[in-house]
Image (tube, helix red, strand yellow):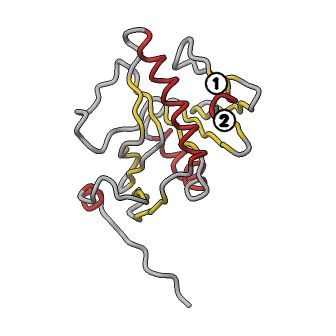
Amino acid sequence: MTAPPVARFTREQFLRLPESSPGFRFELVDGELVTMNDPLPLHQVAVGALHAELRAWCRVATGRGRVLLSIDTEIGPDTIVGPDLQWFAAERELPDLAARPWPAGDLVIEVASPSTARYDAGTKLARYLAAGAREVWLVSPVPLGVRIVRPDGERRVGVGGTLTSALLPGFELPVAALLD
């Protein structure tokens, strides 16, 4: 028995696909089209909490940058992915809001899903950093915790800890609040 053929796409072919389809999403990894199911509610609760807190932090003062939900992000040749959240520093020159794909954010956040966890912690993590991300948060809803990876090292924050970042002065979020 042989494996079914893998759909191969170029960057240009990928960008011509519809932006979304009900029930599944696409990413392009080394020219391979990766299809993912819509995330589970547990995933969406964590993404929603992070987005709300980061957006509130950005809006408290000027010059705090922009946080965006999943957008097409180019992190290598024929590799365009959609991280769950990204924060872009205010001093960054960014594409038009209607453009795609975008570059990797200064902070990239992936919330683990069963269908994407191996890509998030493997292929995508290394490429986010190589593409210029200064920090990547890998959030695990079960068991709840966050792995924070920077080019110079990493740390883990458990359910009793608080998320902070040198990139986000004054930002604090108890990890337990991710599933509230």
Q: CA distance from mark 2 to mark 1?
A: 8 Å
The x and y percentages for residue 69 are: 42, 37
Residue 45 vs residue 3, the one in the foreground = 45
| Left or right placement of residue 180 versus residue 92 in this view | right
Looking at the rendered structure, the secondary structure element under dot 2 is: strand
Looking at the rendered structure, the secondary structure element under dot 1 is: strand
The x and y percentages for residue 146 are: 66, 35
Q: Residues within 10 Å of mark 1 (few under 14, many from 20)?
A: some
Residue at position x 38%, y 72% in the image: 7
16 shown above or below 95: below
Residue at position x 45%, y 23% in the image: 55
The quadrant the C terminus occupies is top right
Quadrant of residue 175 in the image? top right
Residue type highlighted by circle 2: Val
| Left or right placement of residue 166 versus residue 132 in this view | right
Residue 29 vs residue 157, the one in the foreground = 157
The x and y percentages for residue 108 are: 49, 35
| Left or right placement of residue 161 versus residue 55 in this view | right
Q: Are marks 2 and 1 in contact (CB under 8 Å)?
A: yes
If you read the primary sequence from the N terminus, does the residue marked by circle 2 or circle 1 appear first?
A: 2
The x and y percentages for residue 151 are: 57, 33
Residue 68 vs residue 63, the one in the foreground = 68
169 shown above or below 7: above
163 shown above or below 69: above
Residue lying farthest to the top in this orientation:
61
Q: Which mark is residue 146?
A: 2
Q: Which mark is residue 163?
A: 1
Quadrant of residue 160 in the image? top right
Quadrant of residue 71 in the image? top left
Residue type highlighted by circle 1: Leu
Residue at position x 58%, y 21% in the image: 165
| Left or right placement of residue 176 versus residue 53 in this view | right
